[in-house]
Image: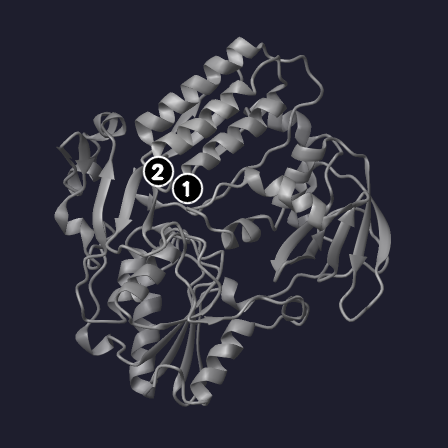
Amino acid sequence: MKIQLLLFLMVLSVPLLAQSGIRADKLQEDFDFLIQELRRKHQGLYQYEDKETVDKQIDSLRASIDAPMSRLAFYKLVLQTIGLTNEGHTSADLPKLARFRLGLSKSFLPLTLKHCDGNYVVTQHFGEEVEGLAKGAKLLAVNGRSMEEILPNLYPYIPTDGFNETSRREWMGSVTFASLYRLVYGKEKRFEVEILESGQTKSRTISLPAIRYTSFKTKNAKLPRKSIEHRRFVFRVIEDSIAYMSVPSFGRDGFDYPSFYRSSFRSMDSLGISHLILDLQANGGGTEGNENLLFSYLTDQRVQKYREVSMLPGPYEGNKTDEDFIFDKWQSKEGRAVRGEFTLYSDYLSDLGYEKPAVADIFHGKLYVLISGATFSGGAEMSSLVKMTERGLFIGEETGGAYEGNVSGYSEEVRLPHSRILVDIPTVHFQINVRPAVRGRGVMPDKVVARYWEDYSMNRNAKLEAALALIRQGGMMD
């Protein structure tokens, strides 16, 4: 099993139909088992808040199990519990059969959304044709509930790194809003949706029949698709001295990262590029080593990226004979397991077989990094490397991943014995070699640029435009 910096994907599956409750004592056993496994495997449980504070929250959640509960109600409590880890890589899911059964139930809002500076706008419609519904319409209310009322009831079910809010807003997009709305507000057959269309001042209400969860498929999409540049691997020269590079992932299967980096940076050298805009605003991470390889093209420094990479004894004992554990020289140390010293540095490329860049290919010009709440895990670690070395200027929004690292990598799935709910627990603590004054926050932008409603409607990359404006005005780094 290869070390992964996993892009957090919360599989918010469909809940069960009306069912008899599970006995309170059985659910208490499930809850106690979950806490036991989190304490045994997850190093983040007491990372951002002291043990007494977290344990009080645990006790309060356990005390709420005082009567039989449906699996759905208990699932909601499990999501709140894993949120105490302050770690966005931790996730929970209902049993497969339960997901399948309710996936066929027509009870979901047929829209996907995207966050735009405090608003959520429609990105796609998967239901019946509705005249006048356009991509980019702002969602104001659902079935008489305003978004200001709805969102605070949904956000607690999305775990985040530390005390981050930008990632929570990003992850509320796509199909997550429809899933969480169903989870919190129950089954509704029809949705009266209030929207405000771009360029209009007066809202209108449209009626949308509910759809099955299984209907959220590309073939059912009713609105035209947008081609969004920062979601693709792109290298292009904007003008004589300025280049743009988009790296939307460090985990794209089959993508040739070495060739992409090599050809891009050699082009910059031959063309005399002195300003590089690196777009990471969609980069949610991937396989460890891909971000280090990119960083090696931006500096000839060998940087200690991690203060330590560690694991608790339980997960280590179960994996210490794995060939990747042996390759990375994991060993027991003072009641924990730690990874080999050589893996802590920015030139660590795992066992991917990559070669370090030629000295002539390293870019020494000015760097502008575009970030957002979707910049997570390995994407956030790349941002941390640039931040800790003061290599570039950040434009956009706080990264979704914490500046000081995360708990991710190898994960272990546990099944709660009575509810059969599955919980995925990450086990490797990647501690970036920094000590920020304010813990539990992402890399902060030097220049704040949010995504506005108009930007999405016009398919405009406002962060890129801001970077270009800085460069053309002489730049903040001059």
Q: In the drawing, does residue 173 fall left or right of residue 53?
A: right
Residue for point 24% across, 75% down: 362
Instruction: Look at the numbered discs 1 and 2 and tell me whether their residues touch, using CB distance below 8 Å.
Output: yes
In front here: 327 or 123? 123
- Image coords of residue 310 (percent x, y): 23, 39
> Element under label 1?
loop
* Residue annotated with mark 1: 87
* Residue annotated with mark 2: 44
Sequence order check: which comes first, mark 1 or mark 2? 2
Color style of the picture = one colour
In front here: 334 or 138? 334
Residue for point 21% across, 26% down: 317
> Element under label 2?
loop
The answer for how far apart the CA atoms under marks 1 and 2 are is 7 Å
Q: In the drawing, does residue 124 fall left or right of residue 8?
A: right
Q: Quadrant of the C terminus?
A: bottom left
- Image coords of residue 168 (percent x, y): 53, 49
- Amino acid type, label 1: Glu
- Amino acid type, label 2: Gly
Residue 57 visible here: yes
Q: Quadrant of residue 177?
A: top right
